[in-house]
């Protein structure tokens, strides 16, 4: 299968080569981590000084590599002291105590270790202690809109944008094809079931499967709305599901570990502090969110757009919070390298009441940080409205800020 290079991640991984760090490529299953490794192999395999040791735990040939001792034996058999060794391990968490082996090999001269994992705590615990912080994470996100266009050979247009907002950015859709709706949803359902079973149910020995799925459906239906664990527990009780607040928080942490979704806290813009309760939840992939919401994209377009804006801010490297003012809510307060921006996400800004809601709150922020309203308003590209940049959703998702 053709390996399409995602240049941002390729360059990022290459930038850490030779710096004495274990490189951990993390993200949800089927988000493209394996292909970042395969792309790395393609770009380096013709180097006469390179010895690539590649272990893919999803392949049958490596099914007997179960422990750190098995891993040590395989690497030792392939290691070449007169070359630069690249040790690449796909889905490293499938190997028991893999961290003990890595701590031995990454310190060898002329050796780089690159691993992938589908759990956000891949480098926590024992490995972090043993290597004293000598590791770096590269987070892989679903395809951006620009990558989606490239992968599927599409031109930038409103229909292309709707395909992206509906189906999301899992790279595997290129092989499935996006012109058969039934195939797309079958593929997304398969990915969802794999993530939930392997990275949540199996990893954490979950027994309450109905509540697990009901809670994910709830988060799909309430994307971008303020929620709290206690209010969710009360709602579930009204639906004849008796669960505790702590159980809601525990299950949500499992979803976050598996990169299914993110809980985004509220930030007091004037007080410069985080609130300890009530947050918004956004999905890592729009297609999986829409799957759990029964594919009702157009009926929930504002939620989908807000989720899309949040994810693209993350892809652009921003740390994102939900902004709170006495005068109202700012969808996102995003910071990067000490720079802060304020962002409102909207569907169509046409009626005066909508304009006052989206622009009015931003005007009440008394500082000079850049302010944006991002919307799908027809015929809009970009314009300045009294110091606030009104940017089209398509332009933002394709070109950034």
Image (tube, helix red, strand yellow):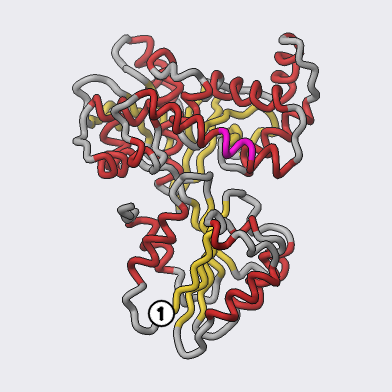
Q: Is residue 180 left or right of residue 221?
A: left
Reading the image, the residue beneath label 1 is: 50
The spot of residue 169 in percent (x, y) is 39, 38
The spot of residue 340 in percent (x, y) is 45, 44
**Residue at the image point whose x is 42% and y is 16% from the top:** 357
Q: Is residue 314 left or right of residue 218?
A: left
Residue 211 within the segment the image draws in magenta: no
Query: Does residue 85 lie above or below 328 as drawn?
Result: below
Which is nearer the eye, 280 or 91? 91
Q: Furthest-bottom residue in view?
A: 82
**Residue at the image point whose x is 64% and y is 63% from the top:** 64
Disc 1 packing (10 Å; few <14; some 14–19; many ≥20): some
**Residue at the image point whose x is 53% and y is 82% from the top:** 79
Q: Main secondary structure of the magenta part?
A: helix
Q: In which quarter of the view is residue 173 placed? A: top left
Q: How many marks?
A: 1
Which is nearer the eye, 158 or 54? 54
Q: Is residue 66 left or right of residue 268?
A: right
Query: Does residue 40 lie above or below 205 as drawn?
Result: below
The spot of residue 219 in percent (x, y) is 59, 24
Q: In which quarter of the view is residue 215 placed? A: top right
Look at the image and tell me in which quarter the C terminus lies.
Answer: top left
Secondary element at image label 1: strand
Which is nearer the eye, 196 or 20? 196
**What residue range appears in magenta?**
193-197
**Residue at the image point whose x is 39% and y is 23% from the top:** 182
Q: Is residue 267 visible?
A: no
The spot of residue 398 in percent (x, y) is 28, 39
Q: Is residue 166 visible?
A: yes
Query: Does residue 107 lie above or below 188 as drawn?
Result: below
Q: In which quarter of the view is residue 270 placed? A: top right
């Amino acid at each position: 299968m053709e390996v399409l290079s995602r240049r941002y991640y390729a360059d990022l991984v290459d930038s850490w080569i030779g710096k004495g760090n274990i490189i951990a490529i993390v993200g949800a299953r089927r988000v493209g981590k394996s292909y970042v490794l395969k792309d790395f192999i393609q770009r380096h395999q013709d180097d006469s000084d390179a010895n690539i040791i590649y272990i893919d735990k999803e392949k049958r040939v490596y099914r007997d590599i179960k422990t750190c001792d098995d891993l040590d034996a395989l690497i030792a058999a392939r290691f070449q002291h007169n070359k630069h060794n690249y040790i690449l391990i796909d889905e490293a968490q499938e190997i028991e105590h893999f961290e003990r082996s890595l701590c031995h090999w990454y310190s060898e001269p002329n050796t780089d270790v690159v691993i992938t994992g589908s759990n956000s705590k891949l480098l926590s615990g024992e490995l972090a202690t043993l290597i004293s912080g000598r590791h770096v994470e590269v987070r892989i996100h679903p395809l951006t809109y620009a990558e989606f266009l490239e992968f599927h050979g599409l031109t930038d247009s409103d229909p292309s944008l709707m395909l992206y907002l509906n189906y999301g950015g899992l790279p595997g859709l290129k092989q499935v094809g996006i012109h058969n709706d039934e195939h797309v949803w079958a593929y997304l359902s398969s990915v969802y079931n794999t993530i939930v079973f392997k990275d949540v149910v199996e990893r954490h020995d979950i027994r309450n499967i109905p509540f697990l799925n009901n809670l994910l459906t709830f988060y799909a239906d309430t994307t971008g709305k303020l929620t709290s664990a206690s209010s969710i527990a009360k709602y579930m009780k009204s639906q004849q599901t008796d669960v505790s607040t702590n159980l809601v928080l525990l299950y949500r942490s499992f979803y976050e570990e598996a990169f299914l979704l993110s809980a985004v806290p509220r930030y007091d813009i004037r007080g410069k502090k985080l609130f300890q309760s009530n947050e918004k939840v956004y999905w890592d992939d729009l297609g999986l969110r829409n799957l759990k919401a029964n594919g009702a994209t157009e009926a929930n377009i504002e939620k989908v757009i807000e989720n899309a804006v949040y994810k693209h801010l993350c892809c652009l490297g921003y740390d994102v919070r939900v902004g709170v003012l006495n005068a109202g809510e700012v969808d996102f307060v995003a910071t990067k390298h000490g720079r802060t921006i304020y962002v409102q996400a909207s569907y169509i800004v046409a009626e005066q009441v909508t304009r006052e809601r989206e622009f009015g709150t931003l005007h009440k922020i008394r500082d000079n940080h850049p302010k944006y309203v991002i919307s799908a308003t027809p015929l809009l590209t970009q314009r300045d409205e009294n110091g606030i940049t009104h940017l089209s959703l398509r332009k933002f998702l394709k070109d950034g800020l």
